[in-house]
Image: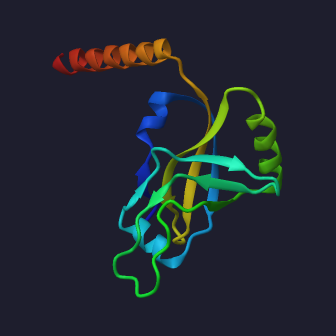
């Protein structure tokens, strides 16, 4: 079966330089899991912060409410707790205090046993000229691949 990717944050690779990645579990309600299985999630404006109690919290990630639920729907933009090892939390907390680093969600996926996981990226914001250089490099690779296909 493998991994089923639910949603990706494509904008993150354009806006940020990803330095390191981490995998975390998420504390979700039942209807949120069902909604994610249907592919109804959005990571674009999401970010992660570590609160005063040392817990990683996920902000601004939109998970639409499940339309077939019978009880009160959950707020789509609610703050969600992330499950990381204590040593990872301490390491991330130290790195997040550095200037210019942020922890952003890259993708949400389900692993083989049905648990939802989120891939987080320790990122540094790109400047405008970095974005232009990246686009130019990608266009060059595309052009080279096109020429190689022709023969």
Q: Residue at x 57, y 26 (%)?
A: 125
**Is there any visible trace of residue 3 in the rendered image?**
no
Is 123 on the left or on the right of 4, as rendered? right
In the current view of this chain or complex, which residue is farthest to the left? 150
Chosen colour scheme: rainbow
How many numbered discs, if any?
0
* Residue 55 locus on image (x, y percent): 76, 57
Above or below, 41 against 32 in this view is above
Above or below, 27 against 104 in this view is below
* Residue 107 locus on image (x, y percent): 49, 49
Q: Residue at x 67, y 55 (%)?
A: 57
Is 76 on the left or on the right of 120, as rendered? left
Q: Residue at x 48, y 58 (%)?
A: 109
**Is there any visible trace of residue 74 in the rendered image?**
yes
* Residue 138 locus on image (x, y percent): 37, 20
Classify residue 92 by image quadrant: top right
Classify residue 21 by image quadrant: top right
* Residue 104 locus on image (x, y percent): 58, 42
Classify residue 41 by image quadrant: bottom left
Above or below, 68 against 33 in this view is below
Which quadrant: the C terminus?
A: top left
* Foreground pick, 22 / 30: 30
Is 38 on the left or on the right of 115, as rendered? left
Which quadrant: the N terminus?
A: bottom left
Q: Residue at x 35, y 67 (%)?
A: 38
């Amino acid at each position: 079966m493998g991994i089923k990717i639910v949603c990706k944050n494509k904008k993150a690779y354009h806006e940020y330089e990803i330095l390191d990645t981490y995998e975390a579990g998420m504390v979700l309600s039942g209807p949120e899991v069902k909604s994610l299985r249907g592919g109804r999630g959005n990571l674009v404006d999401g970010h992660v912060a570590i609160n005063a109690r040392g817990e990683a919290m996920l902000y601004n990630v939109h998970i639409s409410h499940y339309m077939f639920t019978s009880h009160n729907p959950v707020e789509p933009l609610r703050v969600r707790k992330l499950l990381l090892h204590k040593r990872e939390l301490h390491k991330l907390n130290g790195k997040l205090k550095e200037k210019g680093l942020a922890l952003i969600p890259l993708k949400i996926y389900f692993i083989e046993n049905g648990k939802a996981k989120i891939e987080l990226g320790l990122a540094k914001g790109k400047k405008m000229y970095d974005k232009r250089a990246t686009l130019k490099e990608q266009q060059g690779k595309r052009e080279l691949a096109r020429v190689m296909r022709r023969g």
